[in-house]
Image (spheres, grey):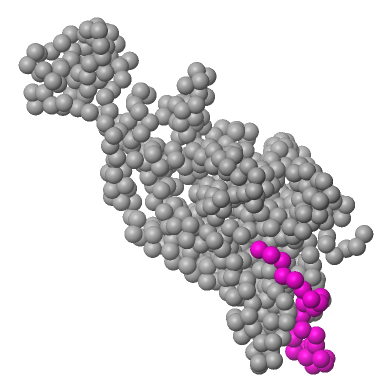
């Protein structure tokens, strides 16, 4: 997709009078009203409500005995060993998997964007295919694939090469390999994002660099990568929220008991098995604040490494 | 173009490796169940050949005997010996053979077990589930597209009170983990509104737009030259007409991409379904129904067959729209 050549930098029609400005504002407000209303009733009010709940000891089984216990919940969170353990597991997971996701998506996108590629659309579609498989099916599929008896990994590769059979597999613990494999195998939307960013770079820059003698690797690492840092940043934020329990673009969904990160699982457990709604809310908020801090740090340092075309530095 | 062929070869090999599990799924779905238990069975879908002798069917094995490998039917399996019948000379009677018959490779013939699929249609209410999924997805698509496009248009072309503040708030909402909003909303849906067991908790939020789609659409709308809209305005087009006749045709690839992304999400959606619809048998969509089936019947070939059934429609859509979809999502830093 070529970027449109803009002759001037106008993005909205210049208002000719204050009446027109007001009129335009009204239309604008009207147009975004669905989102605005949704923001209020689906986001702001629940957030406030959950904040309030987190200061109570509301339990589902005895809803009348609700008491306002102030910060007690949060103090308990700090003392909660399971929460600490599970939080650390989630952080470890994020540290490993997010760089992998970004690297793999850039790599595959670079490959799919290459001018030499034949049957572009078909190949890209085929690479996207695994990401539309439902999550539970993906896990079962891989279990079958890795199965020592009928799985292809053993039958097609390991046996002919007389290597060890992989032991029979079941998702166990937090660090089982499937946890890493699944997000990488279903990285379709991530590839889309990187591909779009790469296509937004005009080819003249590459030609100029080639004229100056820059080789393939130089062109890739010193030009492509820096120019797609906005997409990398976007992907980083998205993947971060996905690991930490946000459900968005890249979420293919598992049951409310299924989760990507252990912290998520722990909150689910407290909420749905122990029914300690108040404590679960405080756990969720603790996590929320934690993630927010990380994201704010990311935003704060972004000016150093993300390329903003408009800013003249 | 130098080195076109090696590069493409590399890509194709990588693609093949990448899609191996998918091939596994397809091939396994066509296998009869008994083939799964036999470690020595071939990889392609096949059926164990049997031979009828004295009114009963016996299976053939490759038996090493008399200086070669014969194909004999096993009639009396014993731990250390076995009796066979030669299908080509049944009149010679049972043949005794020393050895462990379990180590023998069976004689298989290529065979596709279509019954896997018919069995599925027998045990699951596929028509009902298809209908439910269709309804949920279709209504959801209309809801989310209408709201997101409208809101994105509003953000892209109109000055709003507070300037860009609302837009930044939009981006901020992407970062909110679901957990913090989930608990209160669940209570409201179930205890106040009594929406448990209906599609409403899933569908209603979609009428308010999705921040990520709005963001993507808005970026795309902004990149369309304003002159086109000004020309339309000169002809007397109001905002909605401009949206419909100028903006949308220009941004069709992104709109299609967004709809497809949401479609795949909604078709496979399980989290909210399991929460709100799990109890209502009549409204169960494909995703939840099949997943339940797979956890109760973890037989590989049936599992894969059911997955294929769920996947059939989305895959079809994916290939139908691939030309639009594969142009990628353009996310540049340009804030024009």
> In the depicted view, which residue is nearer to us: A300 or A105?
A105
Q: Main secondary structure of the magenta part?
A: loop
**Residue A175 appears in the figure:** yes
Q: Residue B9's x, y, as percent?
A: 56, 40
- What residue sits 53% from the left and 52% below the top? A119
Magenta stretch: residue A20 in it? yes
Left or right: B221 as drawn, with respect to B193: right
- What residue sits 7% from the left and 16% below the top? B91
Q: Which residues are magenta?
A: A1-27
Picture quadrant where residue B231 is located: bottom right
Question: How many tags in the picture?
Answer: 0
On screen, residue B199 above or below A109: below
On screen, residue B39 above or below A39: above
Q: Residue A29's x, y, as percent?
A: 71, 81
Left or right: A185 as drawn, with respect to A239: left
Q: Residue B220's x, y, as percent?
A: 68, 69
**Residue A182 appears in the figure:** no
- What residue sits 29% from the left and 11% below the top? B100
Q: Residue B212's x, y, as percent?
A: 66, 62
> In the depicted view, which residue is nearer to us: B13 or A101?
B13
On screen, residue B88 above or below A284: above
């Amino acid at each position: 997709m070529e970027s449109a050549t803009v002759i001037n930098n106008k993005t909205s029609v210049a208002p000719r009078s204050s009446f027109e400005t007001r009129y335009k504002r009204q239309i604008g407000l009207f147009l975004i009203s669905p989102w605005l209303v949704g923001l209020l009733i689906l986001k702001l009010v629940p957030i406030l409500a959950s904040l309030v709940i987190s200061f109570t000891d509301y339990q589902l089984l005895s809803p009348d005995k609700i008491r306002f216990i102030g910060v007690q919940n949060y103090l308990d969170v700090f003392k909660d060993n399971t929460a600490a353990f599970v939080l650390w597991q989630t952080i470890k997971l994020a540290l490993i998997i997010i760089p992998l996701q970004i690297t793999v998506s850039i790599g595959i996108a670079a490959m799919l964007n290459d001018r030499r590629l034949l049957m572009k659309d078909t190949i890209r579609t085929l690479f996207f295919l695994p990401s539309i498989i439902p999550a539970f099916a993906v896990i079962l599929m891989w279990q079958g694939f890795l199965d020592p008896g009928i799985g292809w990994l053993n039958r097609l590769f390991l046996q002919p090469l007389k290597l060890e059979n992989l032991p029979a597999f079941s998702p166990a613990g937090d660090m089982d390999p499937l946890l890493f494999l699944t997000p990488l195998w279903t990285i379709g939307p991530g590839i889309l994002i990187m591909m779009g960013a790469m296509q937004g770079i005009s080819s003249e820059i590459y030609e100029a660099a080639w004229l100056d003698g820059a080789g393939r690797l130089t062109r890739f690492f010193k030009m492509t990568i820096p120019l797609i840092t906005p997409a990398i940043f976007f992907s980083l934020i998205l993947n971060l929220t996905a690991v930490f329990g946000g459900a968005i673009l890249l979420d293919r969904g598992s049951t409310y008991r299924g989760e990507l990160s252990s912290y998520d699982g722990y909150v689910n457990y407290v909420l749905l098995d122990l029914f300690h709604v108040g404590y679960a809310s405080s756990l969720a908020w603790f996590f929320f604040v934690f993630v927010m801090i990380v994201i704010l740090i990311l935003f704060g340092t972004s000016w150093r490494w993300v390329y903003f075309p408009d800013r003249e530095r | 173009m130098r080195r076109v062929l090696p590069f493409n070869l590399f890509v194709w090999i990588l693609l093949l490796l990448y899609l191996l599990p998918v091939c596994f799924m397809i091939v396994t779905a066509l296998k009869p169940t008994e083939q799964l238990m036999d470690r020595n069975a071939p990889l392609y879908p096949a059926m164990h050949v049997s031979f009828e002798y004295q009114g009963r069917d016996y299976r053939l094995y490759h038996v090493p005997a008399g200086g070669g490998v014969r194909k004999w039917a096993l009639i009396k399996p014993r731990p250390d010996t076995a009796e066979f019948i030669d299908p080509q000379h049944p009149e010679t009677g049972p043949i005794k053979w020393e050895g462990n018959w379990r180590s023998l490779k069976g004689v298989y013939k290529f065979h596709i077990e279509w019954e896997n699929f018919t069995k599925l249609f027998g045990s699951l209410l596929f028509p009902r589930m298809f209908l439910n999924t269709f309804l949920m997805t279709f209504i959801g698509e209309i809801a989310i597209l209408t709201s997101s496009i409208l809101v994105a248009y509003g953000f892209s072309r109109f000055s709003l009170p507070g300037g860009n503040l609302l837009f930044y708030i939009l981006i901020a909402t992407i970062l909110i983990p679901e957990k913090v909003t989930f608990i209160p909303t669940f209570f409201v849906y179930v205890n106040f509104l009594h929406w448990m067991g209906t599609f409403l908790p899933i569908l209603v939020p979609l009428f308010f737009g999705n921040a990520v789609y709005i963001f993507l659409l808005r970026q795309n709308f902004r990149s369309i030259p304003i002159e086109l809209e000004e020309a339309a305005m000169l002809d007397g087009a109001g905002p909605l007409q401009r949206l419909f006749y100028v903006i949308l045709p220009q941004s069709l690839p992104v709109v299609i991409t967004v709809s497809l992304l949401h479609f795949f999400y909604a078709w496979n959606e399980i989290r909210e379904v399991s929460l709100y619809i799990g109890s209502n048998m009549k409204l169960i969509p494909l995703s939840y129904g099949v997943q339940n089936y797979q956890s109760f019947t973890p037989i590989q070939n049936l599992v894969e067959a059911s997955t294929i059934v769920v996947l059939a429609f989305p895959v079809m859509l994916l290939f139908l729209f691939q030309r639009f979809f594969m142009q990628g999502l353009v996310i540049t830093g340009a804030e024009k």
